[in-house]
Image: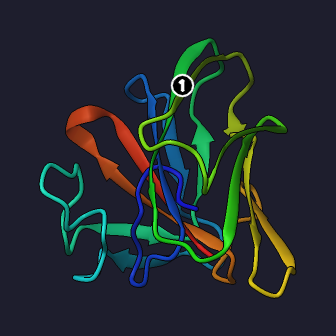
Amino acid sequence: MNLYVKGFAVAVGTTLAMCAQASYIGLDLNQEGISDTTLAANNSYAGTPGSELTIGQAGYAGATVLALEPGPFNLTFTYLFKEARFTNTFFYQGVELFNTNSATGSSYSTTYTGDIGALDFMFTSVGLDGSTKSVTNAGNSGIEPKFSTFWNVGSNTLYLGLDD
């Protein structure tokens, strides 16, 4: 499942989008395991006409999404699509918001009231063999499952793509 953007080199999962007011959200690019990534030519979401992302767009694999300012500010999560064979789920503050059966375009908005630091979200992924793996925002690394992040600066949108 991908939160906000679907893409990394080989996008497997669901895509979700997250919007926040300008400059309140950023990425921790100083942690271990982060690598540059680009949306591959076979990325189903970026290859769709009208997509906010483009083939070849640069992003980061393994970065943690941070609140750069204390709340309150608005966050909106939108489920964009999936291309996963696994069953993936996205949680924010311990509550399931979306899974691979969610309707495309489903949204959830909330007011962030926390402090500066990693946002409290995670993905779970149940493989074809029934094994479950998860990745938290603060535990995102270069090891699968992991998610990649891509900015659409014009819309203040951060796209997350789960690589399950």
Which quarter shows the N terminus? bottom right
Quadrant in the picture for residue 129: bottom right
In the drawing, does residue 142 fall left or right of residue 59? right
Residue at position x 19%, y 72% from top?
55
Percent coordinates x, y for residue 103 in the rendering: 50, 42
Camera-side residue: 96 or 161? Answer: 96
Percent coordinates x, y for residue 49 in the rendering: 12, 56
| Residue situated furthest left in the rendering | 49
Residue at position x 24%, y 57% from top?
53
Residue at position x 30%, y 70% from top?
44
In the drawing, does residue 98 fall left or right of residue 41? right
Q: Where is 133 relative to 22, above or below?
A: below
In the drawing, does residue 87 fall left or right of residue 84? right
Q: Residues within 10 Å of mark 1 (few under 14, many from 20)?
A: some
Residue at position x 22%, y 82% from top?
41
Percent coordinates x, y for residue 73 in the rendering: 55, 15
Which quarter shows the C terminus? bottom right
| Residue situated furthest bottom in the rendering | 129
**Residue matched to label 1:** 75
Amino acid type at circle 1 is Leu
